[in-house]
Image (spheres, rainbow, N blue to C red):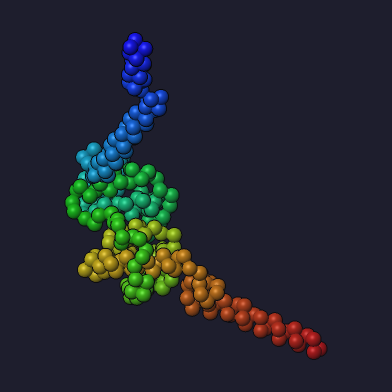
Amino acid sequence: MPENRKLTTRQGRKAGRRHPLASVALIAIGLLFTGGAYAAFSATSSATAQADATSQQTIDEGKKLFAANCATCHGLAADGTADGPNLIGVGAAAVDFQVGTGRMPMAVNGPQAEQKPVQFTDEQVAALAAYVASLAPGPAIPEGEVLDGQGDLSNGGELFRINCAMCHNVAGAGGALTEGKFAPPLTGVSSKHIYEAMVTGPQNMPVFNDMNITPEGKRDIISYLKYLENNPSPGGFALGSLGPVSEGLFLWIFGLGAVVALTVWITAKSN
């Protein structure tokens, strides 16, 4: 009997003893739950940060940047001066285009603001845009599928030729305007900035609101331009994509030049 009690006691102790891997499993479960909770918290924080893009703090920061960098020409209240237009109602899209492409602030007064290296960070550009947008309603910064470049190329090409090609050239290569102004080339321009230019009408460009060209139409135009940018000229040398002027000049210089040179060579050989 005493031996049976000892055996039973040993078996009970053995049965109550924790498995060596149990601690490892508990730690792994704890880490799993902790990681999941942290990921959920991070996602919530990110969503909150995006929602706070137009928070009062962002607007106040934009107001300080505006006063320090823009008010000299546009006025402390953004209502314009003799050196700069009124910005009330232009919307966030106009600021994002002008400042985000380096056109503003202008280096010197001239026929139009030229593109140059951007002087602000993305966060500062967003703050300036939020401040100007807070003054009055205006076109917002575009986002979503209108920028994906997956629209109707045929419709985009037709809309571009009807509305844009007279200034920007049918291939988007740009062109000269009057009084020292020009329509810039559209290669290398981001989809966002192309859309913003259409809805805000910078420089000499007219405004194409949703009544003139629908958001779907703007998406098609962007898709057409991106197609031209990413595909080489099917006819060979593009010659700057400047149309019959550059092509005619090429023929006059090289084509007729080659004919004249050949004629001179044949005459010299015959003599």
Closest to the observer, 208 or 23? 23
Q: Position of residue 83 (x, y in %)?
A: 30, 52
For image coordinates 40% across by 45% down, the residue present is 119
**Above or below for 193 versus 44:** below
Quarter containing the C terminus:
bottom right
For image coordinates 36% across by 75% down, the residue present is 154
Q: Position of residue 167 (x, y in %)?
A: 38, 70
Closest to the observer, 86 or 191? 191
Q: As drawn, which residue projects farthest toward the front?
A: 1
**Above or below for 22 versus 73:** above
Q: As drawn, which residue projects farthest toward the right?
A: 271
Closest to the observer, 114 or 81? 114
Res 64 visible = no
For image coordinates 21% across by 55% down, the residue present is 138
Q: As drawn, which residue projects farthest toward the top?
A: 2
Q: Position of residue 52 (x, y in %)?
A: 24, 42
Image quadrant of residue 215?
A: bottom left
Direction from residue 9 to residue 89 in the image, left or right: left
**Above or below for 230 versus 114:** below
Q: Position of residue 193 (x, y in %)?
A: 35, 57
Q: As drawn, which residue projects farthest toward the left?
A: 136
Direction from residue 174 to residue 87 in the image, left or right: left
Image quadrant of residue 226?
A: bottom left
Closest to the observer, 199 or 108? 199
**Above or below for 270 versus 221:** below
Direction from residue 77 to residue 261 in the image, left or right: right
Image quadrant of residue 257?
A: bottom right
Res 157 visible = yes
